[in-house]
Image (cartoon, rainbow, N blue to C red):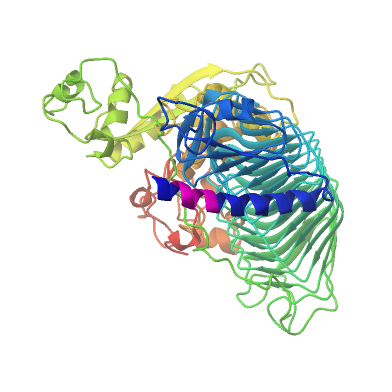
């Protein structure tokens, strides 16, 4: 014990000197640490005495803070500290390496009120699940968060009206949003990793933000920028995010720079709307499943320069009602290179995969472009590939070892008699042939391979589940329709054929048409939709037993897209349908058919039927009869085929001829609770 304390003291002195140097460099040397002392915290010191010394450390962090003065360091030994902490003086809180601060589902875990606070080497978890509940809440300036891990919160780290804050070398996972800034300026974020969050970044009403050398993957949306300006994103890996949304979303912003990044295998590499002065340069935009770059609604001065836009599964670039400049870039091996609709595009000086330039038709060696009520200027083009385009580095997939994703952090508990204490009550074990006096590892038993373990099957026994027969559970909530004659509430009768088709595959599809929820405004944002997931599915409870059992669907009037699968927290278990918008687009189709078609299509996505698995899935080209893509996949008679989406409410068995695909044998029941968007999951093109 004595040797451990001596070693700890030496390490601590080095850390303090390093942190003091960092703090001084941030504010010109105004911090005076000559009177600073170190206060020790150890939760193993249960009997006292407690005076904060190395020999008699405080048991609780709050005691250390209460007895500290400006500039002191609080050193916290390994352990789990169930506390909610207010830091109202200039302090440094340093963990030993496995120092866990558990917020016990309260409003925040750590609230930083003072300026120039340092948080280092801390593990922060379990904020509450309500809007505004936060792992670290910063409402001050010039603070440093470094080498921390933040997980299982509604918001991992929120900076509200704070300037000059820094986040470095930290890990964020399993949060509704990892980092959120609101009305905050001059934030610097470096060398952090973000995974399995609904959003990696949610930047709102903020300016002068720098995001550098971060890895951002398996999130719903990697980077979401709203109403912000002067944002610089450089040398970041933004990859394997939600294959229907995904990468970088930029709305109502100006002066945005993305430089030397790898934006790979998201649904959308970039989606830009109502923004101006956006420059994307020396960046690889490739392997995105829907669109490499989509520019929508009233955007100005969008420039793509020295980029590689290649191997995107559908569109390299699509532009609607805007102006775009693309120069000195490679557009090649996309299914469709460039689509312009009611827009103008200056695409001169680019390479299109061949010295012959772009094509008006589908060619394997040349990228196609086409304009609908728009104009594309493409002459002259480059005759050779531009060798200095794109990023100058590759993603290191082994750089950050992934920590466990705590899908079910607290196991479901029952109050009935459980004689063998194996987590499942006697009555259920007797019902399904288990011995109630013999301990079974029910948390890891899943005899029917439907991704519901026996504890979850016990919970859903009330809804008719069977541990020896595959079950899928779907909850549907709805908003009232704009047209009172066509409700947005689907009837269970409308799903009758689909339920029957699932039954033929020995799968029971349970659909719970649950409750009407308040209207969203017509300009509903991704954030508002995400909040509905927390309010009406999780009911703001991080331990809601339905999480990891049910998929959730909201039928709205209007939302950011016609319909899409979404990540509301940490995995792809959320479906959003814009029913009134769909009816507007397809006025001659009954609304109920549109709702059912969209629901079953996106239910397929939650079951792992994504664009990588088969090229007929989510292929926009199949919509147009007699096009090449339509001919290729016309026998793929599945809800996953856009051509059949709103009139075929089932999946294909692969027996309809050339171009068909067996959806049923490729269902991944575990996908909605352990979503993996890695490109190497591809089965067939």
- Up the image or down, 412 lies above or below 156; here it is above
Question: In the image shown, does 323 or 43 lie closer to the viewer?
Answer: 43
* Spot occupied by residue 522 in the image (x, y as percentages of width and height): 74, 28
Task: Look at 68% across and 73% down and name the residue there.
Answer: 392
* Quarter where residue 297 is shown: top right
Query: Magenta: predominant secondary structure element?
Result: helix
* Spot occupied by residue 610 in the image (x, y as percentages of width and height): 49, 51
- Up the image or down, 319 lies above or below 422; here it is below
* Quarter where residue 626 is shown: bottom right
Give the left or right position of residue 550, taking residue 304 as reference: left
* Spot occupied by residue 538 in the image (x, y as percentages of width and height): 51, 25
Task: Look at 71% across and 49% down and name the residue there.
Answer: 20
- Up the image or down, 327 lies above or below 466; here it is below
* Quarter where residue 303 is shown: bottom right
Indicate yes or no whether the magenta region holds residue 160.
no
* Spot occupied by residue 284 in the image (x, y as percentages of width and height): 67, 67
Question: In the image shown, does 59 or 269 lie closer to the viewer?
Answer: 59
User: What segment carries the magenta color?
Assistant: 5-10
- The quarter of the image holding the N terminus is top left
Q: Is residue 587 visible?
A: no
């Amino acid at each position: 014990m004595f040797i451990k304390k001596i070693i700890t003291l030496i390490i601590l002195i080095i850390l303090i000197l390093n942190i003091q140097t960092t703090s001084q460099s941030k504010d010109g040397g105004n911090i005076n640490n000559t009177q600073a002392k170190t206060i020790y915290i150890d939760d193993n010191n249960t009997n006292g005495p407690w005076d904060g010394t190395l020999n008699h450390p405080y048991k609780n962090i709050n005691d250390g803070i209460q007895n500290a003065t400006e500039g002191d360091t609080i050193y916290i030994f390994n352990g789990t500290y169930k506390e909610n902490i207010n830091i109202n003086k200039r302090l440094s809180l340093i963990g030993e390496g496995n120092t866990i601060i558990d917020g016990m589902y309260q409003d925040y875990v750590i609230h930083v009120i003072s300026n120039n606070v340092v948080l280092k080497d801390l593990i922060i978890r379990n904020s509450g699940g309500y809007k505004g509940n936060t792992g670290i809440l910063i409402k001050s300036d010039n603070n440093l968060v470094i080498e921390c891990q933040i997980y299982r919160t509604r918001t991992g780290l929120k900076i509200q009206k704070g300037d000059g804050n820094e986040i470095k070398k930290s890990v964020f996972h399993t949060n509704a949003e990892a980092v959120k800034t609101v009305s905050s300026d001059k934030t610097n974020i470096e060398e952090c990793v973000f995974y399995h969050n609904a959003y990696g970044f949610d930047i709102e009403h903020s300016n002068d933000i720098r995001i550098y050398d971060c890895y951002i993957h398996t999130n719903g949306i990697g980077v979401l920028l709203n109403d912000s300006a002067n944002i610089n994103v450089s040398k970041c890996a933004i990859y394997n995010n939600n294959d229907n949304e995904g990468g970088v979303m930029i709305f109502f912003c100006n002066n945005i720079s993305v430089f030397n990044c790898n934006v790979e295998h998201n649904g959308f590499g970039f989606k830009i709307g109502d923004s101006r002065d956006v420059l994307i340069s020396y960046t690889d935009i490739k392997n995105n499943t829907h669109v490499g770059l989509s520019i929508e609604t009233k955007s100005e001065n969008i420039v793509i320069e020295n980029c590689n836009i290649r191997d995107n599964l559908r569109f390299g670039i699509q532009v609607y009602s805007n102006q775009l400049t693309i120069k000195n870039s490679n557009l090649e091996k996309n299914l469709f290179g460039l689509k312009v609709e009611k827009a103008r595009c200056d695409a001169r000086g680019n390479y299109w995969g061949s010295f012959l330039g772009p094509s008006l038709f589908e060619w394997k060696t040349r990228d196609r472009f086409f304009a609908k009520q728009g104009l594309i200027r493409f002459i002259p083009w480059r005759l050779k590939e531009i060798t200095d385009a794109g990023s100058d580095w590759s993603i290191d997939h082994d750089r950050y070892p992934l920590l466990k994703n705590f899908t079910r952090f607290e196991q479901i508990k029952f109050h009935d008699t459980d004689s063998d204490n194996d987590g499942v009550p006697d009555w259920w074990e007797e019902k399904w042939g288990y011995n109630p006096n013999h301990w079974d590892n029910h948390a890891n038993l899943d005899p029917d391979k439907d991704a519901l373990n026996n504890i979850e099957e016990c919970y859903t026994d009330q809804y008719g589940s069977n541990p020896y027969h595959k079950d899928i559970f779907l909850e549907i909530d709805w908003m009232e329709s704009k047209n009172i004659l066509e409700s947005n509430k689907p009837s269970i009768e409308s799903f009758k054929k689909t339920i029957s088709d699932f039954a033929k595959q020995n799968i029971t599809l349970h659909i719970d048409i649950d409750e009407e929820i308040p209207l969203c405004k017509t300009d509903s944002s991704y954030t508002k939709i995400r909040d509905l997931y927390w309010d009406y599915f999780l009911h703001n409870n991080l331990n809601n037993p339905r999480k990891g059992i049910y998929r959730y669907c909201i039928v709205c009037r209007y939302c950011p897209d016609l319909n899409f699968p979404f990540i509301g927290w940490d995995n792809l278990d959320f479906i959003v349908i814009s029913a009134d918008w769909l009816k507007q687009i397809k006025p001659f189709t009954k609304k109920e058919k549109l709702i059912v078609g969209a629901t079953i299509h996106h239910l397929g996505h939650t079951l792992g039927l994504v664009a990588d698995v088969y090229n007929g899935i989510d292929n926009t080209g199949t919509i147009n009869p007699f096009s090449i893509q339509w001919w290729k996949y016309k026998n793929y008679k599945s809800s996953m085929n856009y051509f059949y989406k709103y009139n075929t409410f089932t999946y294909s068995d692969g027996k309809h001829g050339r171009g068909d695909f067996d959806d049923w044998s490729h269902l991944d029941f575990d996908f909605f609770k352990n979503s993996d968007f890695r490109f190497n999951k591809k089965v067939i093109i």
